[in-house]
Each structure stands twice: as C-alpha cells, then as structure tokens.
Image (cartoon, rainbow, N blue to C red):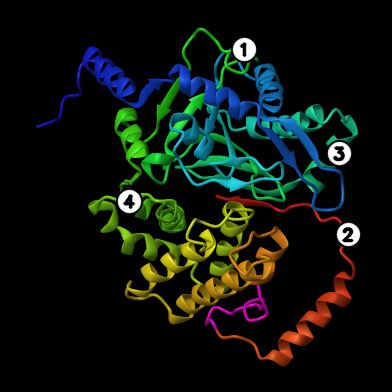
C-alpha cells in the first residue's frame, strides 16, 4: 500500500505552523540592545604589522548589505546576526563578561554574521568573498587596503562544499579574541550546537539604519521552536539533540556553557559520552587535539577576566573538559594528560600576570605560549609518541634557519572540504 502525500493545502498549513513556531519578533528593549551591538566598535588587527582597522559593526554591515544587493535579485541573499551577539540581544543575561581594550564588558566573544543564499547558485561564493574583502577596505576608507586584506587581516578561511553542506567562513583577526566572522551558507545540515546558540536576527536595510525602525525585527531559532529556545536562554539551560551530528561533538562549547553558569538538562548530560567520542573521532591525534584546543582558547578566552572566585575561566573550562574525558571509555590517557597540563600552565600564567598573585588576564601570545609549550610544541605522530628533546631542539634550529625573522607574509590557506 503506497503512502499518499498530504494535499498542497495541508502541506502549506504545516509549513506555516512550523515557521510560526521558529520565528519571533524583537521587543523594544531587545531592539535597543541590537542597535547597541551594531554601534559597537570592531577592531580588525593585522598579523604582520599593518595598522589596525576600527569601525562600527553597523558601518560594515550597511556596506555589506548594499553590495549584496548588487549581486542578488530580491531577497535571495539574506543578512543575519548569529551566535553570542544574537543571544545577548535576545537576553542580556547571556554569557559571561569580558574586558576589552576600551574597558567595556561584553557578554559574547565574536561578531557572527551569516549570509544566507536562498538562490542556491554555486558560482556566487567567489563574488560574495570579494565583497566581504571590499567592505573592509571601504569602512577603513583606504582603497589600497583591498590588495592586502587576505594576506594581512584574515586569520582563517574555510570552505565546505558537499552534497549535504555548502558553506564558507571568513574570520578577521582581533588581538583580544573578539573576531568578526562572516559565514556564507547555501545549505548546512546542522545550523546550531545548543538551543541557546540557535538565534538568527534578520538584518534588513531598515534595521541597519541609525534610528530605531517602527517595524518589528524578525528573529528565528533554527532549533525549531523560538519560545522554547528563549526559555532555555532565560533559565540558562543546556539543551541539544543528536550531538553526534556536531563537528567535535559540541564538547568544547558545552564545557564553556558550564563555566558560564548554564545547567544541562538530564537528556543533555546523558549525551556527554557522545560529545566526547565525536571530538576524538574528528581530532584523532594529539597534534590535532592540541591545535583545536589552542584555536578555541584563542577565540573564546583571550582577555577574559577572572570569576569572583578568582579562578580563571580558562582553567575551569579545562578542568571540566578533563573531568568529562576522564570517565569516557576509550579516551587516551595522553589526551587527558594534555588537557591537565594545559590547565596547570594556564593557572601559572594567570598567577604570574597578576600583581597580587591572583588570577590575571591573557594576551594571545601568552595563550600560544602556555598552550603550545615545549612539551607539546612538537609534531606528534599518529601513534602519539613524543620525539626526544634532542630531536626537538634540532627541529627548532632548522625552522629558525628556514624562516628567519617573522618578516615574510604568508597568505592564509583556504581550507576546502568536499
């Protein structure tokens, strides 16, 4: 017996109901917070001694929105605010404060911008990528900057192009870890890690105007239920489904939410082994695990102030990560030892930075120093065996002879996954 598809009217009603569940509108208070975020000064720093570029997020997004209109028809390229900044707009109690260069405390790490391509045109990414670079030169009021944006101001670029996922990411550098990340999405199988990360705020031209718009601003939760995700955010609950679908299992983000005072529901706590196993699958060697941890630290913990208890957030994060890994069968003792020694080194650096012996703050160089210290700044083989100290010293000398002083510019490699 063949299954009959629902009539068009019923299918349309179901889609309308699903859209109503996932969508909402910002209140006046939330809209005011959105404009406060848009007026935040963003600093894009060079990795090779060029001058930093400072501009408001609103300036960059207005330039980006205008240029996107020139390469798309109608509303095929949608501009959205995502991540911690969007969650902060939805609820001001989100996250944990961190100190920036101008001594303001903010509750999110990155400015995550999403360009959603509803036209599904394969050849449009190259044009959009050039627009992303052009907009940085425009807001810097330095057209000559365009020729060195990729070399000097981009910290990483990733392109994933497969049957299920078609997206790309450009990350601009910030010395304090609050990066500007622009993500181009045609389609993506998993759009969120946890429900509190699932908010997308639509940024229309009227929203990007200087004054508050009389029309409400649309916000959606890709978790599937806006009110439910909003409740999780207000009550600081950690909720997710099928973490094994998340690259890295969401383990690092999960531990960060724990540090920030969020509480996992029972179903999420039971998923901890799946998170850990997926992390070990995606990063199977010590070398890959170390580089992933260093990258996460540089993006999420640089410049963070200590908690009231005096324990640096990075130390608490590493301790929670170790406690989960230690009880999951199959976790290598070398991996647990790596996380443990990174925690000890982080606490040592924090104490050394504080004039009164308490917890201090970190710079990106210090994070690289302790996270990639001499015990783990080696090329680990798949067997996870460490080279001898003599070979390591010889390797360092060869690298110095080959590279010399850090005066050469190297274009950030574009990692492509198919």
**Lower position in the chain sequence, tag 4 or tag 2:** 4
User: Circle 1 is placed at which residue position?
Assistant: 211
Kindly state the secondary structure of the residue where label 2 is placed.
loop
Local crowd size for mark 4, using a 10 Å CA cut-off: few (<14), some (14–19), many (≥20)? some
Q: Which mark is residue 47?
A: none
**Lower position in the chain sequence, tag 1 or tag 3:** 3
* Real-space Cα separation, disc 2 to disc 3, in angstroms: 16 Å
User: Circle 2 is placed at which residue position?
Assistant: 408
Q: Position of residue 398 (x, y in %)?
A: 83, 80
Q: Please identify the quarter of the rendering in which residue 375 is found.
A: bottom right
User: Circle 3 is placed at which residue position?
Assistant: 147
* Real-space Cα separation, disc 2 to disc 1, in angstroms: 45 Å
Kindly state the secondary structure of the residue where label 4 is placed.
strand
The region drawn magenta spans: 372-384
Task: Let me know if residue 333 appears in the view.
Answer: yes
Image: 175 above or below 407: above
**Lower position in the chain sequence, tag 2 or tag 1:** 1
Residue contact at pointers 2 and 1, CB within 8 angstroms = no
Residue at the spot 43% in from the left edge and 71% down from the top edge? 322
Kindly state the secondary structure of the residue where label 1 is placed.
loop
Q: Position of residue 23 (x, y in %)?
A: 37, 23
User: Circle 4 is placed at which residue position?
Assistant: 263
**Lower position in the chain sequence, tag 1 or tag 4:** 1
Dot in front, 1 or 3: 1
Image: 52 above or below 321: above
Kindly state the secondary structure of the residue where label 3 is placed.
helix
């Amino acid at each position: 017996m063949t299954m009959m598809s629902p009539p068009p009217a019923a299918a349309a009603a179901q889609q309308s109901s699903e859209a109503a569940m996932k969508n909402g509108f910002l209140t006046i208070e939330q809209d005011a917070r959105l404009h406060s975020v848009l007026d935040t000064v963003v600093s894009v720093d060079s990795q090779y001694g060029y001058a930093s570029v400072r501009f408001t997020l609103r300036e960059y997004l207005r330039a980006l929105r205008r240029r996107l209109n020139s390469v798309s028809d109608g509303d095929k390229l949608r501009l959205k605010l995502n991540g911690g900044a969007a969650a902060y707009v939805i609820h001001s109690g989100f996250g944990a404060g961190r100190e920036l260069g101008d001594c303001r405390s903010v509750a999110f790490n990155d400015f995550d911008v999403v360009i959603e391509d509803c036209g599904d045109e394969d050849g449009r990414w190259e044009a959009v990528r050039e627009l992303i670079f052009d907009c940085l030169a425009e807001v810097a009021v330095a057209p000559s900057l365009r020729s060195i944006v990729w070399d000097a101001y981009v910290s990483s670029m990733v392109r994933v192009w497969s049957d299920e996922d078609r997206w790309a990411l450009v990350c601009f550098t910030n010395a304090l870890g609050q990066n500007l990340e622009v993500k181009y999405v045609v389609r993506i199988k998993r759009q969120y890690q946890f429900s509190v990360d699932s908010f997308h705020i639509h940024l229309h031209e009227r929203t990007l105007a200087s004054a508050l718009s009389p029309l409400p601003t649309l916000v959606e939760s890709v978790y599937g239920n806006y009110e439910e995700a909003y409740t999780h955010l207000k009550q600081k609950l950690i909720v997710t489904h099928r973490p094994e679908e998340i690259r890295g299992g969401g383990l690092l983000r999960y531990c960060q939410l724990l540090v920030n005072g969020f509480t996992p529901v029972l179903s999420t706590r039971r998923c901890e082994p799946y998170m850990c196993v997926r992390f070990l699958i995606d990063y199977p060697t010590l070398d890959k695990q170390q580089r992933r941890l260093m990258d996460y630290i540089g993006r999420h913990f640089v410049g963070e102030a200590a908690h009231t208890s005096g324990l640096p957030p990075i130390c608490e994060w590493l301790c929670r990560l170790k406690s989960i890994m230690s009880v999951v069968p199959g976790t290598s003792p070398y991996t647990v030892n790596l996380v443990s020694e990174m925690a000890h080194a982080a606490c040592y650096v924090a104490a050394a930075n504080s004039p009164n012996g308490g917890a201090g703050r970190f710079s990106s160089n210090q994070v690289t120093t302790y996270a990639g210290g001499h015990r783990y700044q080696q090329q680990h083989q798949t067997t996870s065996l460490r080279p001898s100290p003599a070979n390591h010293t010889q390797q360092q000398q060869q690298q110095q002879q080959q590279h010399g002083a850090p005066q050469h510019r190297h274009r950030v490699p574009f990692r492509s996954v198919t």
